[in-house]
């Protein structure tokens, strides 16, 4: 078993770039591979495009950034960190993963270790990647070439948890591959690296942990819609339940579930189980509930605007937030896109503002957005929106506030005193 000195990281996004920089800091010779010229140009200029990575980290690193996949021939390990989205019909899209494996395969040396970090359903390593690698290299996986799965765990915007300190699981189909991969990650990451019994088990861990999050969010979203009818404040109830020191994990309702992980990963499990004769009714129902939340949010706005058939038509609405998550600029699968479409289709006179995504905003500032509007929908809990006060809404003649992230619930009474209609998600 050869010593690992040079590592290639394929895919330099919010997963791969921090990993490449960390491995470099740990003394490995690192090649950062990506097909995106804009990314490579930014990296070569020392400019970060990832919120959690500073430009200084890039300029101080020795990582070689390139699109030349032939450089893989110098590597003892190749870590694949490319996206695993879903298609329009929610079926898994393994295109980027297959593309990455196809690009590296011709250049892999004997006994090179390939590690997949991308989130996939159980079975992808055994049934897709292994045959592709063996066909393209003429080598036998687990014998002449090694394969392991170490699902990524990144929480963008998290000030405490990052690639250097988050526990990981690792799976492989032979002791030798498992040991090699475990040692590599233990030399890079200062956390528990848990060995699973197979590739499939490691794949299953990731889709399970993210499906767990999706169903828990769906649970509180359903509660929010129910409590909205009963006039019960769901956030107070959740926070009350969270005083129980065991067996309760608080989640919070909102206008929808976005991002590259939570709304996507359950479909990988749903599809694979379906192909094996099992229907994940519960996971599908959770997805349906979470995908309905943008509609529920728009219904709250219609109520606030008088709840007539065309109360939205011509309504001057400011949509605050495009990003799927507070204080980051990432709009993948963001529910704000669905809300925007619903409002545009209803003929609302809409402006959109997200301080983290100016290129998709229609106005340049929060002031400009509020100046235009008579109604506001908060779709992302950015700090800039959390600090809004009733007097600001009143000064802009705003009469309706729909709080899609319940981040203004503490000024609910202030708003109501200023005769401003306030509705949160399960908070009224
Ligand atoms: N959301 C809710 N209610 C909640 C929590 C989240 O509506 O109680 C919404 C968010 O607004 C967002 C979406 O769900 O639109 C996803 O939120 P997230 O906090 O799960 O953010 P992500 O997608 O960055 O999730 C990452 C995930 N990390 C990986 O998949 C590697 C996830 O596993 C983590 O659990 C999550 O970070 C985390 O713990 O914050």
Image (tube, rainbow, N blue to C red):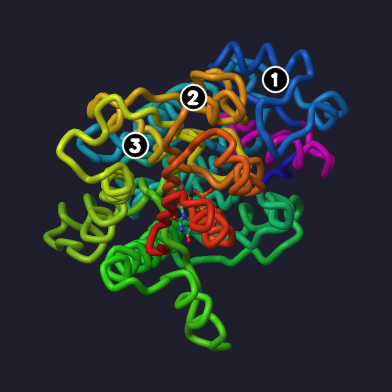
Q: Name the residue located 40 percent from the left edge and 55 percent from the top edge.
A: 423
The residue identified by callout 3 is 339
Query: Under tag 3, what secondary structure?
Result: helix
Is 83 within the magenta?
no
Residue pictured at 58% horizontal, 62% vertical: 410
- Indicate the position of residue 112 as horizontal and vertical percent values: 58, 38
Q: Say if the magenta span includes residue 14.
A: yes
Task: First in sequence, mark 1 or 3: give its number.
Answer: 1
Q: Is residue 361 above or below residue 266?
A: above
Secondary structure under tag 2 reads helix
Whether residue 113 is visible: yes
Q: Left or right: 327 with respect to 219?
A: right
Q: Quadrant of residue 363?
A: top right
Nearer to us of marks 2 and 3 is: 2
Count residues near mark 3 (Cα–Cα under 10 Å), then give few for <14, some for 14-19, many for 20+.
many
* Quarter placement of the C terminus: bottom left
Which is more N-terminal, label 2 or label 1?
Answer: 1
Magenta region: 6-29
Quarter of the rendering containing residue 270: bottom left
The disc at residue 372 is 2
Above or below, 204 relative to 4: below
Q: In the picture shown, does residue 331 fall above or below 296?
A: above
Q: Residue 65 got which mark?
A: 1
Query: From the Cβ of disc 2, is ligand 1 less than 8 Å away?
Result: no
- Seen in the picture, residue 49 relative to 253 is either above or below; the reply is above
Q: Position of residue 393 (x, y in %)?
A: 55, 41
> Which quadrant of the view contains residue 329?
top right
């Amino acid at each position: 078993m050869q010593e690992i000195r040079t590592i290639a990281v394929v895919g330099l996004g919010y997963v791969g770039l921090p990993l490449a920089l960390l491995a470099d800091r740990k003394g490995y010779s690192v090649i950062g591979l990506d097909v995106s010229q804009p990314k490579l140009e930014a990296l070569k200029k020392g400019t970060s495009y990832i919120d959690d990575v500073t430009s200084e980290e890039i300029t101080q690193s020795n990582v070689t950034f390139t699109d030349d996949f032939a450089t893989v021939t110098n590597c003892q390990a190749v870590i694949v960190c490319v996206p695993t989205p879903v298609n329009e019909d929610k079926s898994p899209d393994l295109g980027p993963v297959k593309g990455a494996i196809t690009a590296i395969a011709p250049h892999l040396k004997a006994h090179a270790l390939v590690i997949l970090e991308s989130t996939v359903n159980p079975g992808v390593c055994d049934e897709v990647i292994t045959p592709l690698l063996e066909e393209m290299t003429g080598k036998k996986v687990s014998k002449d070439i090694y394969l392991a799965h170490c699902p990524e765990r990144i929480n963008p915007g998290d000030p405490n948890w990052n690639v250097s300190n988050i526990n990981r699981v690792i799976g492989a189909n032979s002791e030798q591959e498992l040991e090699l991969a475990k040692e590599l990650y233990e030399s890079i990451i200062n956390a528990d690296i848990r060995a699973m019994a197979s590739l499939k088990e490691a794949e299953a861990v990731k889709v399970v942990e993210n499906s767990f999050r999706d169903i828990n969010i769906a649970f509180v979203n359903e509660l929010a819609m129910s409590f909205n009818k009963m006039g019960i404040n769901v956030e107070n109830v959740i926070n009350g339940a969270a005083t129980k020191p065991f067996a309760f994990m608080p989640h919070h309702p909102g206008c929808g579930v976005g991002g590259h992980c939570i709304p996507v990963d359950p479909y990988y499990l749903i599809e694979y189980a379906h192909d094996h004769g099992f229907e994940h009714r519960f996971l599908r129902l959770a997805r349906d509930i979470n995908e309905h939340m943008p509609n529920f949010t728009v219904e709250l706005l219609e109520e606030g605007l008088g709840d007539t058939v065309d109360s939205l038509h011509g309504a001057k609405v400011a949509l605050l937030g495009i990003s799927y998550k507070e204080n980051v600029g990432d709009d993948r699968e963001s529910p704000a896109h669905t809300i925007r479409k619903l409002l545009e289709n209803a003929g609302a006179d809409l402006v959109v503002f997200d301080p983290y995504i100016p290129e998709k905003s229609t106005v340049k500032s929060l002031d400009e957005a509020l100046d235009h509007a008579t109604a506001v929908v908060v779709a992302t809990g950015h700090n800039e929106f959390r600090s809004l006060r009733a007097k600001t809404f009143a000064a802009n003649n705003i009469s309706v506030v729909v709080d899609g992230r319940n981040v203004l619930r503490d000024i609910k009474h202030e708003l109501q005193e200023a005769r401003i209609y306030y509705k949160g998600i399960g908070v009224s």
